[in-house]
Amino acid sequence: MATSEQIKALVRAHWSDDPERFRTVALQVAAHEATQGHGIFAHELRAIVDNALRKEHRAVIVQYPPELQGLVRTEEPSTPLAALVLPNGLTDRIHRVIEEYVQRDKLRAHGLGPRRKLLLAGLPGTGKTLTARILAHELQLPLSVVQLDMLVTKYMGESPARLRQIFDLIAHSPAVYLFDEFDAIGGGRTLGDDVGEMRRVLNAFLQFIEQDRSDSLIVAATNSPELLDHALFRRFDDLLEYPLPGPEERRRLVSNALGVFLDKRFGFATVIKASTGLSGAEIVLACCDAMKAAILSDSSHVAARALVPFLHERHEVRRR
């Protein structure tokens, strides 16, 4: 049956109100039972977790105007703040956003408003989209992802009109609205390859976000802040810059990802060195690969020497 460490991990995850962690450990228990020859029990446990996931990730049904069908995708995320591994200063600023929103009425009574318009900048895999999901979960709001690749059309004036409809939705349906890959519409208006329709979309966005007084959070995420038009920065309440994880963040990422698979004599120094320059998402993927290899070889633990080759693989993918 489950090891004492797995049972303790399950109890800690339950009482820390961390459902994501609880599910991870439950799946690890199922994997462990499978390696012990308890296939029926492992299958039943995985089925319980899968059913719970299907219920939690069921999309929120929102009645969009026909023109917005496929342009905005809404879901109800279940990722808690505990899942975010960032430098302490950045985590504190995200806590501040949550606290200000929760007590927004108190701020407004004094003529002040909460931070609602956030610009997130950083390399891919550093936690920008994850932050939007966590904000939605912590504030008990849906997450609405704006599909920017479908926003711009070839017909003059149609794209700003669709953007106006999105901001009407923002005003009347409180949620966390994520504009991912934001440089697609936020590029500088002086760029030589700019086209008229894109310029109109950017001008419309600048106007609509400045006029917005809703209870929604507007989150724009970009991998290339240097490409954004300078007028955008003063339209947002806060700019959060996401660095690659440092040594301490990499240690926490590996520890969280491996969970009960973490070998008791795990050589963190070797892994921290091997993971230098990788994003958080890349490190987690490497840990998942190492856990799969452990399961397939009937092992219940991952040692540092087993994880390092998968980290090297991620470096190779990045170089390509």
Image (cartoon, rainbow, N blue to C red):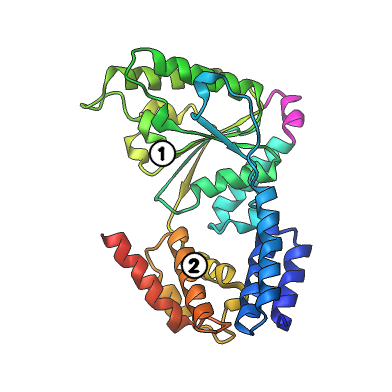
Element marked by disc 2: helix
**Point 75% across, 58% down: residue:** 17
Q: CA distance from mark 2 to mark 1?
A: 25 Å
Mark 2 or 1, which is nearer the eye? 1
User: What's the residue type where badge 1 is placed?
Assistant: Glu
Q: Is residue 261 left or right of residue 220?
A: right
Which residue is label 1 attached to? 181
x then y, percent, for residue 156: 34, 13
- Determine the residue positioned at 51% across, 23% down: 68
Q: Nearer the viewer, residue 22 or 66?
A: 66
Indicate the secondary structure of the residue bearing disc 1: loop
CB atoms at circles 2 and 1 under 8 Å apart?
Answer: no
Report the span colored magenta: 103-112
Say which mark, if any, is on residue 250: 2
* Residue 5 higher or lower than 178, as above or below: below
Could you say which is closer to the camera, residue 126 or residue 137? Answer: 137
